[in-house]
Amino acid sequence: MINENKIFDVVIYGNGLSAKSALVALIKQEYKILWINNINKEENDDRTTMLSPVSVDFYQKLNLNNLRSIVFPTKKILIKTKNQKNFTTFEDKKFQKTLCFLAENKFLHKELNIIISNQKKKKNFLELNEDIDKLNSNKNYNEIILKSGKKIHTSLIIGVDGANSLIRDLSNIKSKDKGIKKYGLVGLIEHDQTHPFTSWQVFSENGILALLAKENITKTRSVSSMIWSLDKNQMECLFNLDKDDFEKKIKNEIGLNLGKLSLISKISKWPIKRIDVSNPIGLRSVVLGDAAHAIYPLAGQGFNLAIGDVSELVKTLNWARNHGLDLGSSVVLNKYENKRKVWVNSITKLTDGLDWFFTNTSVQTQNILGTTLNFVDNFDSIKRKLLETMVNN
Ligand SMILES: Cc1cc2nc3c(=O)[nH]c(=O)nc-3n(C[C@H](O)[C@H](O)[C@H](O)COP(=O)(O)OP(=O)(O)OC[C@H]3O[C@@H](n4cnc5c(N)ncnc54)[C@H](O)[C@@H]3O)c2cc1C
C-alpha cells in the first residue's frame, strides 16, 4: 500500500538488468526505495553478456549467491581481421588472470530476482506495478503521477528503462537517437576441439563475429556463445540460412579448425540501437544504463558501462547522505555526471570508431588493422597495457 504523503529517497523505474542491479545495490545501502515497473520481458532474453572482472566484483559484493556457477571465465582472447593469417592473443601469461566472464542474461535476472524478492519484506522497499503518466519536478521534490492518478513523491527518480526511456523524455533529458543500424545474431554453438577459457573475435567486411567461451562439457567438447554483429541485409541473409549452411558460414568466418561445429540453440536477432545522451541528468532525475548510452556491442561494454553507472551513483548518493545533502539536488547529480562522462564518452567513441572502420573502409584499409594487431602481437608491453585496461574496467 503506497502512502501518498511519504517521500521516497529514490524511485527506480525500469525492469532490465541495469534497473535490477541498481535496485539491489541501493537496497543494500538502506535507502527508502520505490521500484516502479510494469513490464516483464526478461524471460525472452536469450543473450549472453561479457562481464568485466570489475562488474563481477560488483555482483559479488551484492552477495549474488550462485554467481560463481553462472559465470564462465575467459583467460585468452584471440582477435584478428579476416585477412590476417594468425590471431593476436591477449592473455596474462604469468598469472593466467581471468580477462572477462560470460553470463547468460536469464540467469543474471534469476539471481537478481531472488535477492529482490527476499528484500520485499523490508519496510524501506516497495514495488509497484503501474505506469508513469507525468512527472512534475520542482526545487524541493519530484511528483510522479501514475496512470491510475496516484501521486508519489521522491527526492530522486532514476530512469533505468532502456534505450527508449520514458523517464528521459519526461525529464527533458536530451538524446540523439541514431536509430537501428545493426543487428546482433545470437546463439550457442558446440565444437569438438577444446580451447579452454578461450574467446575469439573476427573483424571483417562480413561484420564482427565473436565466439565467447562458455562451458567445457567434456575434455573434447566445448560450448561457446556466438554473437555476430551485422547490418540489416547481411543479417537477413544469414538468418534465413538453414542450419548446415549457417554452421559453414561460422567456420569460414572464424577460419579456425574447431573440429565438428554445430548450432545447439535457435538463432535470435536483436536490433542494436545507438543513442547518445550528452548529459544524463535532469531536474531531480538521472538515467542509467541503455537509457543513458546505447552503444554497439562489439567490445562487449554496454552493460559493463551500466554497472559502472550504478557503482558511481551509489558512491555519490552515499557521499551526499554523509554530508546531509538532498539526494536529488543538482550539486549531487552534477558530481555524478562529472565522474562518469569521460569514461562513457571514451567507450562510445571507441565502439563507434571500430564500427565505422568496418562498415565504411575498404578491405585494403581494414588490413591496416591487421598490421596493427600483428605489430601489437610482437610487443608484450603494449599487450600488457591493453590487458590491464580490460581487466580493470
Ligand atoms: C546482441 C547484444 C549483445 C550484447 N552483449 C553485451 C556484452 O557482451 N557485454 C555488455 O556489457 N553488453 C552487451 N550488450 C549490451 C547490453 O545488453 C545492454 O547494454 C543492457 O542490456 C542494457 O540494460 P538496460 O537494463 O539498461 O536496458 P534494457 O535491457 O533495454 O532494459 C530496460 C528495461 O526497461 C523496461 N521498461 C521500459 N519501460 C518500462 C516500464 N514502464 N516499466 C518497467 N520496465 C520498463 C524495458 O522493457 C526493458 O526491459 C549487448 C547487446 C546486444 C543487443
Image (cartoon, helix red, strand yellow):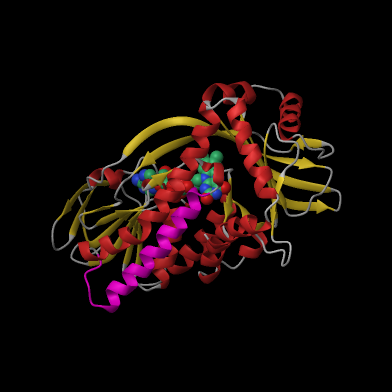
What residue is rendered at 65% in x and 43% in y?
A: 373
The percent coordinates of residue 55 (x first, y second) are 53, 61
What residue is rendered at 44% in x and 45% in y?
A: 348
The answer to whether one can see residue 261 in this image is: yes
The percent coordinates of residue 236 (x first, y second) are 58, 22
Q: Is residue 334 above or below residue 366?
A: below
**Nearest the eye: 91 or 250:** 91
Please tell me whether the stretch drawn in magenta is mainly helix, strand or loop.
helix
The percent coordinates of residue 381 (x first, y second) are 64, 59
Q: Quadrant of the N terminus?
A: bottom left
The percent coordinates of residue 148 (x first, y second) are 24, 47
- The magenta region covers 301-327
Residue 246 picture quarter: top right
User: Left of 391 or right of it: where is 75?
Assistant: right
Let me know if residue 188 is in the magenta part: no
Let me know if residue 316 is in the magenta part: yes
What residue is rendered at 51% in x and 49% in y?
A: 301
The answer to whether one can see residue 211 in this image is: no
